Image (cartoon, rainbow, N blue to C red):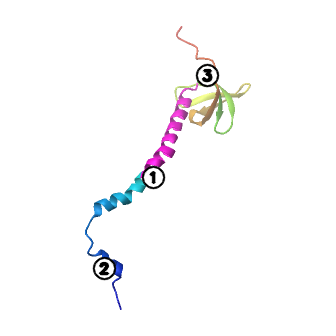
Amino acid sequence: MNFISPAFAQTAGAPAAGGADIILQMAPFAIIMVIMYFLIIRPQQRRAKEAQDMISSIRRGDTVVTSGGIIGKVTKVAEGSEIELEIAPNVRVRVMRQMVAEVRSKGEPVKDTAA
């Protein structure tokens, strides 16, 4: 019986050219990572930045839609992370800024209180 496979016997005396083999084997993975960056990661970062800009630019009078589907008009914007929405006449709720999914229409500019 033969305990050593012919494939193992043939590779035992082969010269070590490991550097070029490793680069050729890793090249497809590197190409896939570059493609994933441009198709998935970069657009996702851009959308996150746009959402953050939208949330930070909310002002009084804007009509917004929350992530729960509530549509309301912004009546008060606090410096913190909360805004106050009027969802019906004389019905106001406090909502976290991060829960705003969409700004439908822009309202009036903030009045200057220093004058």
The question of residue 6 being in magenta is answered with: no
**Which mark is drawn over residue 84?**
none
Q: Which residues are magenta?
A: 31-58
CB atoms of marks 1 and 3 within 8 Å: no
Q: Amino acid at mark 2?
A: Ala
Residue toward you, 42 or 6: 6
Choose mark 1 or mark 3, whichever is in front. Answer: 1
Q: Amino acid at mark 1?
A: Ile
- At 59% from the left and 29% from the top, the residue drawn is 83
Identify the secondary structure beneath mark 3.
loop
Real-space CA distance between mark 3 and mark 2, rounded to the nearest whole angstrom: 79 Å
Q: In the current view of this chain or complex, which residue is farthest to the top?
A: 115
Q: Earlier in the sequence, mark 3 or mark 2?
A: 2
- Mark 2: give few (<14), some (14-19) or many (20+) Cα within 10 Å: few
- The residue under label 3 is 60
Question: Would you say the magenta stretch is mainly helix, strand or loop?
Answer: helix
- Mark 3: give few (<14), some (14-19) or many (20+) Cα within 10 Å: many
- The residue under label 1 is 32
Q: Earlier in the sequence, mark 2 or mark 1?
A: 2
Query: Residue 23 in the image: x percent, y percent?
Result: 34, 57
Choose mark 3 or mark 2, whichever is in front. Answer: 2
**Which mark is drawn over residue 9?**
2
Residue toward you, 100 or 104: 104
